[in-house]
Amino acid sequence: MLHDFALVTTYLPILALTLRAALLVSFVYWGMYSAALAFPSVIMLTASIVFLDSQLMRSHADMASGHLCLCALAVLTQQSARQCGEGGMLAMMLVDLVWSTLVSADLVGGVTGVRVHLPPSTKALLACAFASAHVLVGCAAIPFFEMLTRAVLFYVLCAVVILCSPFMPPGPTQHAHSALHLCAPVLFVHHYPMIASVLVLIASHARLIYASMQRRRPDASRTEPDVAVRRDASPHAGKSAEINELSQKLAAAKRAHGIA
């Protein structure tokens, strides 16, 4: 689906989704640390909010981004801090690096047209496996402002993937359906792999838009000379027609006066 970037309504579902995600993150942290609710109560309330949101909000941006499900999982599963040795930190960094590298490779391959064709279910399974491994070996709890920034960034990047999907090379699967898989590491991985993934995603889509604009320019350059040639040729055609008409009148006049 081609989006009209000049219309404000194109961005309203994305803005609404990002705002709801920010409110959800704020509610979870308020319930856990300010209201001191029991963790099962926080889980139940969060699950209810996510379920109702998924039933009421059915825009394309909501469905392609997984509604608020992944954001809620990222918040609830990264709140327990524990002692972690060098082995644990190394395992977490290894999981994060492998996850970010695979996602970035899939993104670059999709943009350039050289891709490994995997069904969306396989990509979702890999994302769940890496996210579970990160939570299992993770040691630190994510502070509120960092989690809020990650949530907003996640949905902004999902919006970039969705809006740029019409510019992608043709393939068996739609690029917009990969938004959840491509942006999921932003909610979990360490800062350095996360920054690298964000830069790769932005650079890849910027290149995609630039290449799309370059493909459209030759068409305009080919049509403009043709129009100019037609404009230049039209006066000459008119003059030749006038000359022919005058020649015919002169010949008729000579015949009328008996001039050979």
Image: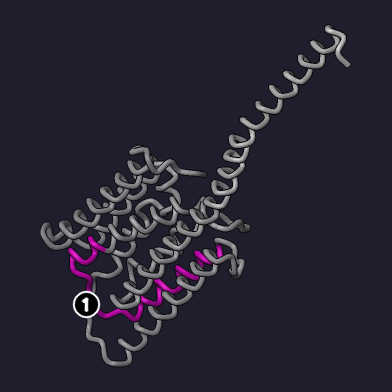
Looking at this view, name the residue that lies furthest to the bottom: 86
Question: Relative to 252, is 191 above or below?
Answer: below
Is residue 34 visible in the rendered image? The answer is yes
Q: Is residue 21 above or below residue 185?
A: above
| Spot occupied by residue 28 in the image (x, y as percentages of width and height) | 22, 57
In this rendering, would 28 be left or right of 247?
left
Which color scheme does this rendered protein use? one colour
* Residue 133 part of the magenta-drawn span: yes
At which x and y percent is residue 200?
40, 70
> Residue at horizontal 33%, vertical 72%?
194
Residue 150: name its quadrant: bottom left
Mark 1 secondary-structure assignment: loop
Q: Which residues are magenta?
A: 121-149
Q: Amino acid at mark 1?
A: Ala
Write the residue at 35% across / 78% down: 136
**Which residue is tagged 1?**
81
The reply to whether residue 176 is visible in this rendering is no
Task: Give the image location of residue 155, x and y in percent.
Answer: 34, 55
Depicted 51 relative to depicted 130: above or below: above
